[in-house]
Image (cartoon, rainbow, N blue to C red):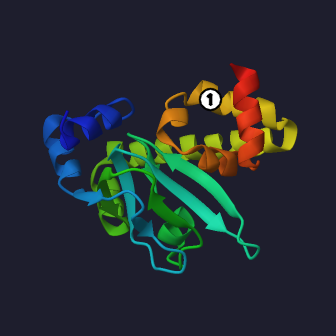
Amino acid sequence: MDAKSILKEHVLKTASLNDEEFDYFFSHFKPESFKKGQVVITEGQEVDKEYFVLSGCLKAFFINDEVKMYILQFAMPTWWSSDYAALYNQVKATITIDCITDVEALSLSNNDREKICKELPQAEYFFRWRTNKGYIAAQKRLLSFMNNDTKTRYEELMSLYPALYNMVPKHLIAAYLGVSRETLSRLYNTSR
């Protein structure tokens, strides 16, 4: 499936755009290719785009003063990623996004998103729905961290995203769960 078809299928699950409206919507996106390990957004830079992943996997992360990595998001196909605080508030990025695998994506600038939202009410509806869905997912993840033990968090993650285990190196899954690689190995072996 080509980029336009992938995005169209994704958007039309939520919004009602006719072919002409979708063509206009799609015309604001730019195809981008990234190699495994390539940085897409660096902490401290200005951010003016978000990315819709067509293939591959991105990771959004933060490294604290003790050089410990905290992974905020894995972005697999049909997921969106950016430093949204930087994008929406026009401040410097506080996270880094890089490529776990080679990635094909579509980028959309903040200005273009705002433009199409003003011109196409269904596009505005789509982006509002997507933002709400992201907020709900972040809230669920935070509540899981506060209420569940590591094994339960691991089982939730694997249940929701089984492809992740084969796509993402185990030390990164461990960082996402906030555990050591050894703990993750024990969880994997007891869950089989």
Please give left or right for residue 94 compared with residue 192 in the image.
Answer: left
Q: Residue at x 54, y 79 (%)?
A: 91
Residue 82 visible in rendering: no
Q: Quadrant of the C terminus?
A: top right
Three-letter amino acid code at the position of disc 1? Met
Q: Position of residue 191 (x, y in %)?
A: 72, 22
Compare residues 157 and 106 and report the one nearer the observer.
157
Residue drawn at x 54%, y 58% as measured from the top left: 60
User: Quick one: which residue is furthest to the top in this view?
Assistant: 192
> In the figure, 90 relative to 85: above or below?
below
Residue 177 x/y as whole percent: 71, 45
Q: Quadrant of residue 186?
A: top right
Mark 1: secondary structure:
helix
- Can you see residue 106? yes
Give the crowd class for mark 1: few <14, some 14-19, many >=20 residues within 10 Å.
some
Horizontal relation, residue 148 to residue 131: left or right: right
Q: Position of residue 152 (x, y in %)?
A: 78, 30
| Residue occupying the point 26% across, 59% down | 32
Above or below, comparing residue 67 to residue 163 in the picture: below
Q: Quadrant of the N terminus?
A: top left
Disc 1 designates what residue?
A: 158
Q: How many marks?
A: 1
Find residue 190 and report its horizontal and vertical position in percent.
76, 23
